[in-house]
Amino acid sequence: MNAAATAHTHCLRCGRTLTSTKSQATGYGPKCAAKVRKAPIETTDYKAHQIASAQELIEDGAIILIRNNVFAAVSTDGTETHLVHPAACNCKAGLKGTRCYHQLAARMLLAA
Ligand SMILES: [Zn+2]
Ligand SMILES: [Zn+2]
């Protein structure tokens, strides 16, 4: 089985070994997934569809911490990887200074 690109063996948040297939797909154990989902962050600057996209990104395990406060986010079609900081992103919207959902996802993960 060649699922290395999408399957996670350890929780992206706490580093614990992931045992269920669902957790391996999302990259978060059940407790961490719940925390990320309820992360107490200001979402008032964002539209509902951006919040949904950010949550989807996290649940798909498509955004991972690569170093302090810097995340790598894979685009929906899997062709691009963006470097994301809670206040900056190198996607098209981010480069224009727009707050993109990648930044929101990064903030959610850091707040969790
Ligand atoms: Zn965890
Ligand atoms: Zn972005």
Image (tube, grey):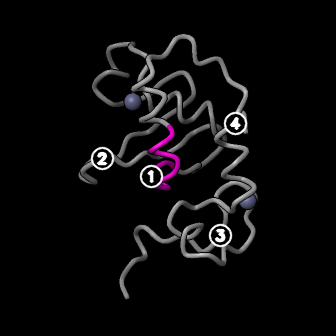
The amino acid at mark 4 is Lys
Mark 3 or mark 1: whose residue is earlier in sequence: 3
Mark 3 or mark 2: whose residue is earlier in sequence: 3
Name the residue that disc number 1 marks.
62
Q: Residues within 10 Å of mark 3 (few under 14, many from 20)?
A: some
Q: Which residues are magenta?
A: 55-63
* Residue 100 drawn at (x, y percent): 41, 24
Dot 4: element: loop
111 vs 75: above or below: above
Task: Tell me whether circle 2 and circle 1 mark residues in contact (CB < 8 Å).
Answer: yes
Dot 3: element: loop
In percent of the image, x 41 and y 35: which residue is there? Answer: 53
Q: Residues within 10 Å of mark 4 (few under 14, many from 20)?
A: few
Name the residue that disc number 3 marks.
10
Which quarter of the figure is the C terminus placed in? Answer: top right
Res 38 label: 4
103 vs 58: above or below: above
Q: Quadrant of residue 23?
A: bottom right
The reply to whether the residue tagged 1 has its Cβ within 8 angstroms of ligand 2 is no
The amino acid at mark 2 is Thr
In percent of the image, x 60 and y 74: which residue is there? Answer: 9
Q: Quadrant of residue 111?
A: top right
Q: Is residue 96 rendered to the left or right of residue 109?
A: left
Q: Residues within 10 Å of mark 1 (few under 14, many from 20)?
A: many
Q: CA separation, marks 1 and 4?
A: 18 Å
Mark 1 or mark 4: whose residue is earlier in sequence: 4
Name the residue that disc number 2 marks.
76
In percent of the image, x 50 and y 55: which residue is there? Answer: 61
Task: Tell me whether circle 3 and circle 4 mark residues in contact (CB < 8 Å).
Answer: no
The amino acid at mark 1 is Ala
98 vs 79: above or below: above
* Residue 51 drawn at (x, y percent): 48, 28
